[in-house]
Amino acid sequence: MINAQGTEPGKYALSIFDILTKARDVTDTLTSDIDLDPYSGNYDNYAWGGEDVILPWKGKLAILSVPSANPAKAMQLFKYVGKDNFRRVPKNDNTLGEELRFDRDSNGKVVRLLHNDNFDNRLK
């Protein structure tokens, strides 16, 4: 990850440790019986300086905008609520947050997402 002088490898190691700690958290449980793999991938978010990474995370979808100085803190979880629609899982109460919606092409492949009123095309 680092191949230059003047960098701080400790901050990267601590960020990885934070993600692994979050993955190990036993309070999160599986909450979805649907196949989340079709949504996984990288989506173009270059208008905001990077891309969104979508991956299954303990029965939910995790979205991480990269680059990020603190990926574990920046990660948001979304719960499946209906066909190609998810809602953000809040940290403090049971009210679901904003929508994350996916669009498919004529062959049924997920090709873009809508999040915070912005479309991100799936990267190949």
Image (cartoon, helix red, strand yellow):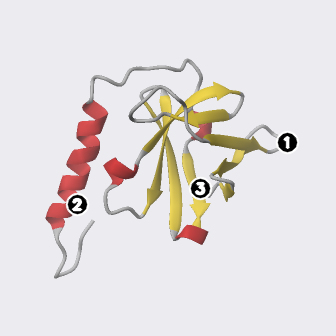
**Which secondary structure lies at badge 3?**
strand
Q: Are marks 3 and 2 in contact (CB under 8 Å)?
A: no
User: Label 1: how many residues lie within 10 Å, few (<14), some (14-19) or many (20+)?
Assistant: few
Q: Can you give x and y, in whole percent of width and height, for residue 5 in the image?
A: 17, 82
Can you tell which mark lies on residue 106? 1
Real-space Cα separation, disc 2 to disc 1, in angstroms: 41 Å
User: Label 3: how many residues lie within 10 Å, few (<14), some (14-19) or many (20+)?
Assistant: many
- Judged by depth in the image, the label closer to the viewer, 1 or 3, is 3
Which residue does the image show at 60% across and 70% down from the upper left? 47
Q: Earlier in the sequence, mark 3 or mark 2?
A: 2
Q: Can you give x and y, in whole percent of width and height, for residue 9 in the image?
A: 17, 66
Dot 2 amino acid type: Tyr
Looking at the rendering, in which quadrant would you find the C terminus? bottom right
Which residue does the image show at 47% across and 57% down from the upper left? 65
Q: Earlier in the sequence, mark 2 or mark 1?
A: 2
Q: Is residue 16 left or right of residue 90?
A: left
The answer to which of 80 and 123 lies nearer the viewer is 80
Can you tell which mark lies on residue 12? 2
Q: Which residue is mark 3?
A: 43
- Judged by depth in the image, the label closer to the viewer, 2 or 1, is 2
Eyeballing the image, is 94 above or below 50? above
Which residue does the image show at 62% across and 42% down from the upper left? 100
Q: Earlier in the sequence, mark 1 or mark 3?
A: 3
Q: Can you give x and y, in whole percent of width and height, for residue 116 in the image?
A: 63, 52
Q: Can you give x and y, in whole percent of width and height, for residue 117 in the image?
A: 68, 54
